[in-house]
Image (spheres, helix red, strand yellow):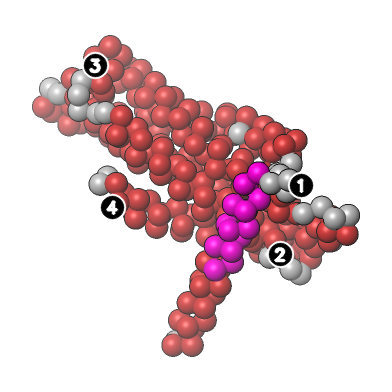
Amino acid sequence: MVGGIGASFLEIAETAGGMTILLARVLARIVPRPGKNIDSRELLKNLYKMGVKSLPIVAVTALFTGAIMVIQAATIVKRYGAEGLLGWGAGFGTLREIAPLLTALMISGRVGANNTAELGTMVVTEQLDALRVLAIDPISFLIAPRFISIVSTLFMMTLFADALALFGAAYTGEALLGVSPTTFYNGLTGGLLGFGDVATGLVKSVVFGLVIGLASCHFGLATTGGAPGVGRAVNSTVMASAAGVFVLDYLTSFALGG
């Protein structure tokens, strides 16, 4: 048992160390230098593939998230006649916690896993070695654009999810409780919620984007063992991203006070 615990600890430490080194290498490429700039075409391609194509699934998730928040609050609202607080009740949890968390999990499953599979396939088919033979830096050409795209996508998708979740909550409140959207939004902006609540969720989205981007790129580059190895790398990315999101969610909530 002790040996198993030690092996798990060493594996986690190795993964954390590898991701930290990869982050340092990516940050070094992001700083503009002659002949060391990231590939702008690859960046735009990944922003479209990861961001624009993620809009439908994020939209569906956000709309139903807002509706669920209203359903959960419906009993209390009816019992105490607190229709004016419905906007605050649904918005507080959505903006600070639920929207960034669920969006991160959706992006992890759709974008992070796909990124790992692509990079892992390139590794096992020696395409990255071919880039090095052609004097093309794989970090500048492939990794840095994908990392920036994942972080940017999660930030933008969280903004999008916030708006759609509140929209879904407002009209679900009207359908189920008879609370007009005007009353809902007045309760949302009546002083109980402020910019700090929105900013907390956006800060979390950036932190989640960092861990998802690092995990997907790290496990993709560390792929070995052919096609089965690609599958193992994708599985490792999904587990590491989900665990990292929840751990960092706790730490960020503690640091930001909610």
Residues at marks 4 and 2 touching, judged by CB atoms closer than 8 Å: no
The part of the image, by quadrant, that contains residue 48 is top right
**Would you name the residue on which mark 3 appears?**
186
**Would you name the residue on which mark 2 appears?**
223
Residue in view at x 45 percent, y 48 percent: 207
Alpha carbon distance from label 3 to label 1: 53 Å
The part of the image, by quadrant, that contains residue 199 is top left
Please indicate, yes or no, whether residue 243 appears anywhere in the rendered image: yes
Q: Does the magenta stretch include residue 222?
A: no
Tell me where the magenta segment starts and ends, as one range: 17-32
Is 221 situated above or below 109? Answer: below
Query: 248 or 177: nearer the eye?
Result: 248
**Would you name the residue on which mark 1 appears?**
35
**Amino acid type, callout 4:** Phe
Alpha carbon distance from label 4 to label 3: 29 Å
Q: Which mark is residue 254?
A: 4
Query: 176 or 69: nearer the eye?
Result: 69
Secondary structure found at label 3: helix
Residues at marks 3 and 2 touching, judged by CB atoms closer than 8 Å: no
Mark 2 or 1, which is nearer the eye? 1
Residue 87 position within the rendered picture, expressed as x and y whole percent measured from the top left: 26, 24
Q: Is residue 27 magenta?
A: yes
